[in-house]
Amino acid sequence: MQSIVSNPVSFTDSARDEIKRLMIDAENESKNSLRVGVKGGGCSGMTYILEFDEIKPTDQIFDEGSFSFIMDKSHGIYLQGMEVNWEGGLNSRGFTFKNPNASSTCGCGTSFAV
């Protein structure tokens, strides 16, 4: 069983509200854990992961108050101190990531290099 440890990632109020809304969606009921992470790819080298998934043995569980999220233990080095935000405007809609570990980011904000 995984243990709950202190959060490497924070969420703005608007991101929390959007995540809670998405968690209620019927399509996400069977995969009730929010995964935060990174994967190789994107125009800057690494891309953020924010999706619903099942818990894996290499995951850590983090409590965000109104929900918890999971993250592979090896991703913490890339995401420590990151803030996730939700922008719901007409010109800009979606999750954004403010990562102090990124040495450069792409124009769309979903890809970064360390």
Image (cartoon, rainbow, N blue to C red):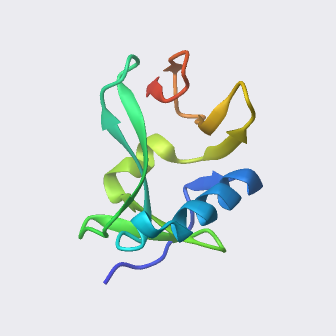
The quarter of the picture where the C terminus appears is top left
Q: Is residue 89 left or right of residue 66?
A: right
User: On the rendered structure, is 12 left or right of 10?
Assistant: right
Specify the quadrant of the image occupied by residue 95: top right
Question: Is residue 33 among what the camera can see?
Answer: no
Q: In the picture, which quadrant includes the N terminus?
A: bottom left
Query: Does residue 83 appear in the picture of this structure?
Result: yes
Total marks shown come to 0
Query: With 55 as the anchor, is 35 left or right in this view?
Result: right
Query: Which residue is most to the front?
Result: 26
Q: Which residue: 36% across, 69% down?
A: 31
- At x 64% / y 54%, what residue is drawn? 10
State the image coordinates of residue 72 (x, y, percent, origin top left).
34, 57
Front residue of 8/56: it is 56
Q: Residue furthest left?
A: 57
User: Residue 113, image x and y in percent?
Assistant: 43, 23
The image position of residue 104, as x and y in percent, is 52, 18
- The residue located at (23%, 70%) in the rendering is 57
Q: Is residue 16 above or below residue 112?
A: below
Residue 93 lies, in percent from the top left, at: 65, 34
Image-quadrant location for residue 2 = bottom left
Give the camera-side residue of 53 and 40: 53
- Residue at 30 percent across and 26 percent down: it is 41
Question: Is residue 90 depicted above or below 56 in this figure?
Answer: above
